[in-house]
Image: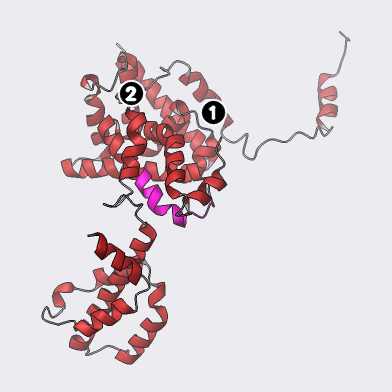
């Protein structure tokens, strides 16, 4: 478990910034990658967004005032970068974001970086039909095993609101799977 | 078991005893939704099915670090670069503003001296948003394209810049 306060101090010191930034990348790259990947679906896109996220963290770390946890801040940047990326792709194709996500998921079966079975594919299709907030809450709670309090710090939603979002999300997913399983 | 036990009376009496236990704030809020969700997700697949190329994460640090360095292999100081961009942008806004003001100064309520005085006092507090707003409000097409910025104005602006050493370093690395 790294000492966040000490790490931030080193990141904000030009002498130790590179070394500290390497530690930061090593510590958080996988968690951020998988969070981003579940939003943008494609590995190549996730790679782009992840790199953009770390560069934004590098650029903005001098202004980071530690009024939230470092990880929450980075997670927020990653979330915003992912959503912006998807929105941009949707605009280029002149479709809305939900349609964009469904389009991306429809390519998963032939995607070499997806090894899910039929039911896992249906699950991804179900998640893609959810409104943005429910998708985020579901992915963070179910796949990333985050606590509601952590999710609340990142998304700025109350714990009660998150519990309701999660419940609605799982109900919709359950219905979608039942309808499409056979 | 004792016959005739008055359970509700026993329960009531234990309820009144303070145990000292507390729960997190809002613990009971949405607990029904949470429990029902858990029942549903037990039947869902546990994995998302995504995978990555082999050794993807191993090479990632170096790829990202390279993007934070300039041609000489030194870390880019984005803080100083941002200050430079803001001061150049602020200078452009001021010059355009004065240019348009001198050409189109018909119904303005403030005199040029008052505007200059305000800018002198507040220029350092101009945020990126202020500059962007000034640029969007200003119709660039209305500006006289032949309005020349005097060389001595540019030189004076550069000499007064606090980031002159960074500007010199930037020129030398090109």
Q: Quadrant of residue B113?
A: bottom left
Secondary structure state at the residue bearing disc 1 = helix
Residue A14 is at least partly visible in this image: yes
Residue at mark 1: chain = B
Q: Residue A65 location, x and y as percent?
A: 51, 55
Q: Are marks 2 and 1 on the same chain?
A: yes
Disc 2: which residue = B50
Residue A80 is at least partly visible in this image: no
Residue at 53%, 48% in the rendered image: A68
Question: Is label 2 in contact with label 1 (beta carbons under 8 Å)?
Answer: no
**Is residue B149 shown above or below A127?**
below
Using residue A114 as the reference point, say whether residue A34 is left or right of it: right
Along the viewing direction, whichever of A157 and B132 lies nearer the viewer = B132
Disc 1: which residue = B34
State the quadrant of the C terminus of chain B.
Answer: bottom left
Looking at the magenta stretch, what is its main secondary structure? helix
Q: Residue furthest top?
A: B1
Residue at 29%, 24% in the rendered image: B53
The magenta stretch spans which residues? A54-67
Q: Quadrant of residue B142?
A: bottom left
Using residue B36 as the reference point, say whether residue A49 is left or right of it: left
State the quadrant of the N terminus of chain B.
Answer: top right
């Amino acid at each position: 478990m790294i000492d966040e306060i000490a790490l931030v101090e080193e990141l904000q010191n030009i002498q130790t910034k590179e070394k500290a930034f390497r530690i930061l990348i090593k510590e958080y790259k996988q968690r951020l990658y998988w969070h981003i990947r579940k939003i943008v679906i494609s590995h190549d896109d996730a790679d782009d967004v992840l790199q953009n996220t770390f560069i934004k963290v590098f650029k903005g770390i001098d202004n980071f005032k530690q009024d939230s946890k470092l990880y929450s801040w980075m997670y927020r940047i990653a979330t915003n970068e992912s959503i912006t990326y998807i929105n941009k792709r949707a605009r280029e194709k002149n479709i809305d974001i939900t349609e964009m996500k469904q389009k991306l998921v429809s390519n998963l079966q032939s995607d070499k970086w997806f090894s899910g079975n039929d039911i896992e594919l249906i699950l991804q299709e179900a998640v893609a039909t959810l409104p943005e907030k429910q998708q985020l809450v579901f992915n963070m709670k179910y796949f990333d095993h985050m606590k509601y309090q952590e999710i609340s710090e990142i998304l700025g939603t109350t714990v009660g609101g998150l519990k309701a979002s999660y419940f609605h999300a799982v109900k919709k997913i359950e219905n979608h799977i039942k309808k499409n399983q056979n | 078991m004792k016959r005739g036990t008055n359970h509700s009376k026993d329960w009531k009496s234990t309820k009144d005893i303070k145990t000292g236990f507390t729960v997190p704030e809002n613990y009971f809020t949405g607990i029904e939704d949470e429990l029902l969700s858990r029942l549903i997700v037990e039947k869902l697949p546990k994995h998302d099915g995504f995978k990555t190329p082999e050794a993807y994460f191993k090479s990632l640090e170096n790829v990202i670090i390279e993007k934070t360095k300039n041609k000489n292999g030194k870390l880019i100081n984005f803080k100083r670069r941002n200050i430079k961009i803001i001061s150049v942008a602020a200078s452009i806004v001021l010059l355009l503003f004065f240019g348009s003001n001198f050409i189109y100064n018909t119904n303005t309520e403030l005199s040029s001296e008052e505007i200059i005085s305000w800018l002198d006092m507040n220029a350092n507090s101009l945020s990126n948003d202020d500059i962007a707003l000034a640029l969007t409000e200003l119709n660039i097409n209305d500006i006289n394209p032949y309005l020349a910025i005097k060389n001595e104005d540019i030189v004076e602006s550069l000499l007064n810049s606090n980031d002159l050493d960074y500007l010199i370093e930037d020129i030398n690395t090109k």
